[in-house]
Amino acid sequence: MAESTNIVQDLSERFGGAILGAQATADGIPTVWVEAGQAPQVLGYLKKDVRQPYKMLWDLTAIDERTRVHRSGQPASDFTVVYHLISFDRNSDVRVKVPLKGEYPSVPSVTKLWQNANWYEREAYDMFGLKFEGHPHLVRLLMPPTWEGHPLRKEHPARATEMAPFTLPDDKQDREQEALRFVPEEWGMKRHSEDADYMFLNLGPHHPGTHGIIRIILQLDGEEIVDSVLDIGYHHRGAEKMGERQSWHSYIPYTDRIDYLAGVLNNLAYVQSVEAMAGIQVPDRAKVIRVMMSELFRVISHCVWYGTFVQDLGAMSPLLYLFNDREKAFGIIEAVCGGRMHPSWFRIGGVAHDLPNGWQKLIKDFVEYMPSRLDGYEKAMLKNQIIKKRTVGVGAYTLEEALEWGITGPGLRAAGLQWDARKQRPYSGYENFEFDVPVFQNGDSYDRARVRAEEIRQSLRIIEQCLKNMPEGPYKSDHPLTTPPIKEKTLKDIDTLINHFLGVSWGPVIPAGEACCPIEGAKGYYGYYCVSDGGTMSYRTRIRTGSFAHLQMLPYITRGHLVADMLAVVASLDFVLADLDR
Amino acid sequence: MWTEIGWPLVVVAGVLFVVLNLAAVLIWMERRLLALWQDRYGPNRVGIFGVLQPVADMVKIFFKEDWVPPFADKVTFVMAPAIIVVTVLLSFVVVPFAPGVIVTDINIGILFFLAMSSLGVYSLALAGWASNNKYSLIGGMRTTAQMLAYEVFMGLSMMGVVIQAGSFSLTEIVEAQRGLWYCIPQCVGLVVFFVAGLAETHRIPFDLPEAEGELVAGFHSEYSGMKFGMFFVGEYLGITLISSLTVAMFFGGWLGPWLPPVLWFAIKTLIVLCLFILIRASLPRFRYDQLIEIGWKYMLPLSLVNLLVTGGVVLLMR
């Protein structure tokens, strides 16, 4: 951390007056306030010139500060733009905040610095109405083009009941449909080349190869992809806005539905951030239970990916085998959590219940059953010559490109960087486990597949260690903000009873502050950036997901490939649309 | 008198009946077998083991609205599914099921089959074109390129057999295998023919014209009801045809001890059919350019070499 305090000093010395101050946050990430005009220079310095540079723009978002009460020591602002950068060389992050004044303020765009800023700035424009000067095509990203208002502004209604009843007369329907028409010129695309007319093909919104509702507009020359544009947001449910209307506790079930294949992994990312703000230390047993369930869900998520990956390449059987295996894992999840895909089982301060009697046998059977199955899949799929022909060298990116586009998780490890948050930034006790981080070098679809296949084995290793070393003790912290508190105690002492009463009727009151404690999710480095204003509800919940970053890169890595390759690349990226649109 | 007019009529009616019903049963068989290999049940509710499932499907498909999209080219759109069924059924004319059980034993049986299968391509290409849908168009284009590449060496792969048997008539080819089935001397021809057959019937790994994950349903995206049913039946008729030709040319047709010849033919054909289904259960799909590459770069030279060697050996033996 010495390195990280230095960066604040370094910046103050170099940029002097442009640095408006530093801010202490609960997650310990150095946070610097920078004056808007100087922001691109400061960010450019951090990306390129500083020793051990911060190469990745991991997240870019905004906060509507107009109704926030507890922000002493921070520069005055109506809106704040937040840049979260990661340096893999120093294994540390920096958060740059830019204060903006006015109703619809503007800030210089950083799309020239980072390619992936494109979507993030469009999202911030869409959600807050902020203008990014110099952005190549600042239009709405998640909301329909005809939407009025910017949903994450505080004055925008959070619920349908606060708005006029929805109607869809014919003329409005026509308008909405017309707004969906794709006009190539708006995206700087030509309709003809010198010797060919291009075909514009809508891949989606409903298409069997896209795993959900997303629209990929392909510019085709024959079957060759000249360029493509992604139209996303069909799955947008306003998960971030909902965070501002749910208590800290009752938001947990919403997190399950972000990366809906990864269940409690979502819970973990969220409760970790809340616990950091509340200052809760989670007991050892709860930590190990969390690790075990998270890894089980990683296996489940990767199983779905494995099956759909080869299915998109045309093989139909593996999907069914893998769904059978996943079903076995779900059996364990159901026995432990009661739920299956969305168990919402982690709690602020621990987990919902202790493990049930006989859980050891379920886990033991599973970790003994899976490895031989995985051997079979590897033989039948990854070593299959047709699959190799279809994926080797297809949709490849270099490590530099991966960093530029904010690729994390298995996608980054496929491009040759051995960086896994469980190893490099252990949380929830991962430092106590033995496992390897698989790395491959080519960054193509095939290597992305191999990384994930190998990760299933490593997850099984971790689960096995959890089985052998499950500590005794409480499954929840006895911190007053643990929600709900341990029931036995509420019946005996008045302090716990009061906390229980408040926690359940109001919801826990989390101290004012900010935290983002990301985890190694199934689909990338995954975090909830929570801002508390000292209330029972979040002031701002920002969800940074892997799918969003990875999909943004799709047009870039599929140029010049064929339509069939597009599907292979889509399958190898492993995204979930709820994770993309939130 | 009776044998002159009556018997051919019985054969024609019998072949039509058996072949069309077989296509229906095949649909059920494929679904059950796939289910077996994929750890699931498959259709098991209608009748014993679900055997009546095709009947239920047929009833459903007949009662569906016979819809032609307003943007389609009507005449061609309606004609296309008929073409595939007609051409495949016509090809069955030359298949010898048993001695005497053949609709017409023309002395250019193989050439007739090749001609018919070439005509069958029109069905897919026209369907893709007439649908006026981008996915269908791509599917139709893929079909045309695929068929061009695969017709060529399909014909050549059969010529080895023709040289050895000294005849284009399938009956004579079967008779010529009394000593040794051609699957042994013509093993290269067999492999090439089977691969071409997979492509001809556009089955995995060569199901590019319809590739559901890429082109939704390719050339038949816009089809529904019985017109879709025709494509469906056409595909299964095609598989049956390729299987029975494989048996006739390489596995001694109806030849075999103890059992009646027709039964031998049926058993052998069924085994080849299961192989088709097994391949579908186990392989992914090639990419368009890779498929064309395999056709022109590997299969065509291979079949030419096979032809040369066979010709040389036959000349030497004389």
Image (cartoon, coloured by chain):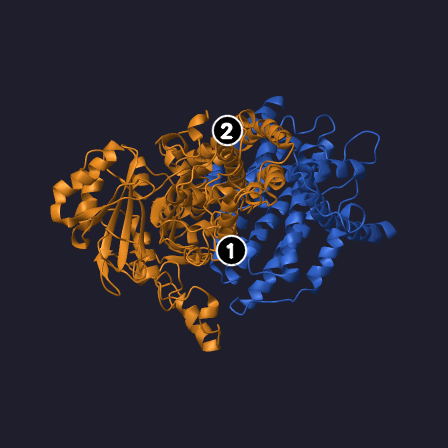
Chain colours: A orange, B blue
Q: From the viewer's perspective, is B97 left or right of B152?
A: right
**Residue at image coords 38%, 45%:** A277
> What residue does disc 1 label?
A505
Q: Which quadrant would the N terminus of chain A be assigned to in this image?
A: top left
- Mark 1 to mark 2 CA distance (whole Å): 38 Å
Chain under numbered label 1: A
Q: Which mark is residue A462?
A: 2
Q: Which mark is residue A27?
A: none
Chain under numbered label 2: A
Q: Is residue B138 above or below residue B38?
A: below
In this orientation, which residue lies closer to the viewer: B15 or A189? A189
* Local secondary structure at mark 1: helix
Q: Position of residue A347 (x, y in %)?
A: 50, 44
**Residue A261 in sight:** no
Viewer-side label of 1, 2: 1
In this orientation, which residue lies closer to the viewer: A213 or B158? A213
Q: Position of residue A425 (x, y in %)?
A: 37, 33
* Local secondary structure at mark 2: helix
Q: Position of residue A563 (x, y in %)?
A: 43, 48
Q: Amino acid at mark 2?
A: Ile
Residue positioned most to the top: B317
Q: From the viewer's perspective, is A539 left or right of B298?
A: left
